[in-house]
Amino acid sequence: MDTERVVIFDTTLRDGEQSPGASLSADGKLELARQLARLNVDVIEAGFPISSLDDFQAVSQIAKEIDGPVICGLARAVEADINRCWEAIKHARKPLIHTFIGTSDIHLKGQLRRSRDDALRMAVAAVRQAKSLCKDVEFSPMDATRTDLRYLCEVIQATIEAGATVINIPDTVGYAMPEKFGQLIREIRDKVPDIQKVRLSVHCHDDLGMAVANSLAAVKNGVQQVECTINGVGERAGNTSLEEVVMALKTRRDYFDAETRVRTEELYSTSRLVSRLMGMPVPANKAVVGANAFAHSSGIHQDGVLKERATFEIMQPEDVGLRESKIVLTARSGRHALKHRLSELGYELSGGQLDKTYRRFLEVADKKKEVFDGDLVAIVEDETTTVPERCKLEYLHTSSGTGTIPTATVRIKIGDQLIQEATCGDGPVDATYKAIDKVIGLPIKLKEYSIQAVTSGAEAMGEVTVRIDDDGGIVIGRAASTYIIEASAKAYINGINKLMARGRVEREGE
Ligand code: KIV
Ligand code: ZN
C-alpha cells in the first residue's frame, strides 16, 4: 500500500487570529502568509471576509499575491457571506470557499433557533451557491462531535451531492476523546455513501488538551486533511498545533504510514514569527518549537546524547530549523560572521538593516560573553521592526530595592523634542511606565505584560511583550535586552509607536 498524503490546512490567519487579543495587522497577515507558503502548507485559510473590511482586504491581498497553497476564505451558510468570500478570494490561483453551519441540537436550538431540516436546507443551498462560483468548496457541520450521528451523515451526504469537494469534521468545543473521535471518522466513512468522492478533513480544538491526539486518531482512521495552526493558537484554548502533527507524522511514519509536504526546517522560524506577530510567547516546554524542546539538562541525558544522539532524541533539531552553530559569536565576531549565522537562522539581512543589527549585536556581546541563537533572533526581530519610531527612548534610570521607593527617570525623543520625566511606582517597571505615560500624556492602558528569558543563564536577554490599548483596540509591543527594565520600557514604547502609526493616538498639538 502507498503512503497516504495528509493535506495540511493552516488556519492560523483565521481561527488562530480568533485567539483573544491576537489580532494581526494587514502587513502582519501578508508576512505570515508568505512564511506559510515557504513552509509549504497545502491550504491557507486566510480569513473570514465578511467579518470586517480589514479582513476582506487582507484576504484579497493574500489571494492576489501568494502563489503555491490553495487560498481559502470562510463563510457562514448564508448568501451574503458566500458572495463576499468569493469576492475576496477570486483572484487566487487556487481558491476555496469554506462554508459552515452548526448541526448539533445544542447549536440548532440554543443559537440558530432552527430545525434540523432548516439547517440541512441552508447547508445544501450554501454549498450549491459556493459551487456556482468556485470549483472547490469545503463544508463543515459545526459541532459535529455533539451532533446526532444519523443526522450528521445525512447532512454530509446532501452537501456532497450539492457539490462539496471537502468535508470537514469539526470538534468545535474540544469535547472529543481520541478513541471515540477515531470511531466517529470510521462511522462516517462507513455510513455516508459518497464519502469517497471528497477529501475528508478534521478540525479540532484543544479545550481538554486533546486536539493533536484527536487529529492523529482521525488520520489513523483515514482522514486525508488536518486543519491546524502554528503554535496551536486559536479560539479559547486553541487549535491542533501544526508543528506537532507534522512532526508526529514524520517521526512515527512507521505507525501512521502517512506524510505531509511541509518543509519542516521552516517550522521554528514560522513559530517565532507567529509568536512575535501575535504577542503570544511560546512556552519553553512546548513540544517541537519550545526553547527546551531539544535541551538536555540531566547529566545522564547529556552523557547519552553525547555518545549517541538517538538515546534521548527522537527528532533532530535541524529537522525543525534549529541548526547548531559551530561558531560561537562574541564581541570579536565580525559583520560577516553575524550575517552568515543570521542567514543560517533564516534571516537575510544587508545594508542598513545589517548595520543596525550589528551595532546592537556588539552592545549585547559587550554585556554577555557569548551571544546565542535565541539572543540573535531577539536582536534581529527588534532591529528590523517596520514601525516608524516616532518615540525613542534616549535615557532611562531606575532605582529600587528593599525598603526604598522605586523611582524612574526617562528621557524620550519625540520628533525633535527631548522630554524628560521622573516618577515613582510600585516597582521599577511600574515607575518606568508611569514616567513614560507622563511624557506621552495619552490615555494608554497596559492590559498585559510578560517577560521571558531568551536563553538560559543569569546574563540571558529578557524578551518583554506588552499589550496596550487606547480604547480603540489592542496592539502588541515587544523588545529584548540584557537589562530587563530597558526591555520593558522599549516594549511599551514599541506599542505606543504602533498606536501612533495607526493614527490612533496623537500627542496634543501634533
Ligand atoms: O471550530 C469550528 O467549528 C470552526 C468551523 C468554522 C470549522 O472553526
Ligand atoms: Zn475552530
Image (cartoon, grey):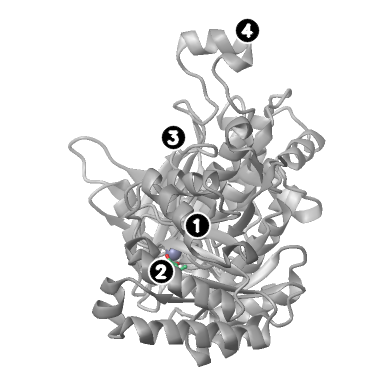
Q: Residues within 10 Å of mark 2 (few under 14, many from 20)?
A: many
- Quick one: 175 or 499, which is closer to the camera? 175
Three-letter residue code for mark 1: Asp
Q: Secondary structure at mark 4?
A: helix
Which labelled disc corresponds to residue 152? 2
Q: Earlier in the sequence, mark 2 or mark 3?
A: 2
Q: For residue 362, which quarter of the picture?
A: top right
User: Which label lies toward us, 1 or 2?
Assistant: 1
Q: For residue 69, which quarter of the picture?
A: bottom right
Task: Tell me how far mark 4 sits from mark 2, CA to CA.
Answer: 54 Å
Q: Earlier in the sequence, mark 3 or mark 4?
A: 3
Q: Is residue 490 visible?
A: no
Residue to which mark 4 is pinned = 307
Q: Earlier in the sequence, mark 1 or mark 4?
A: 1
Q: Earlier in the sequence, mark 1 or mark 2?
A: 2
As drawn, 479 above or below 298: below
Three-letter residue code for mark 4: Lys
User: Which label lies toward us, 2 or 3?
Assistant: 2
Three-letter residue code for mark 2: Leu
Three-letter residue code for mark 3: Asn
- The spot of residue 144 in percent (x, y) is 39, 65
- The spot of residue 335 in percent (x, y) is 78, 38
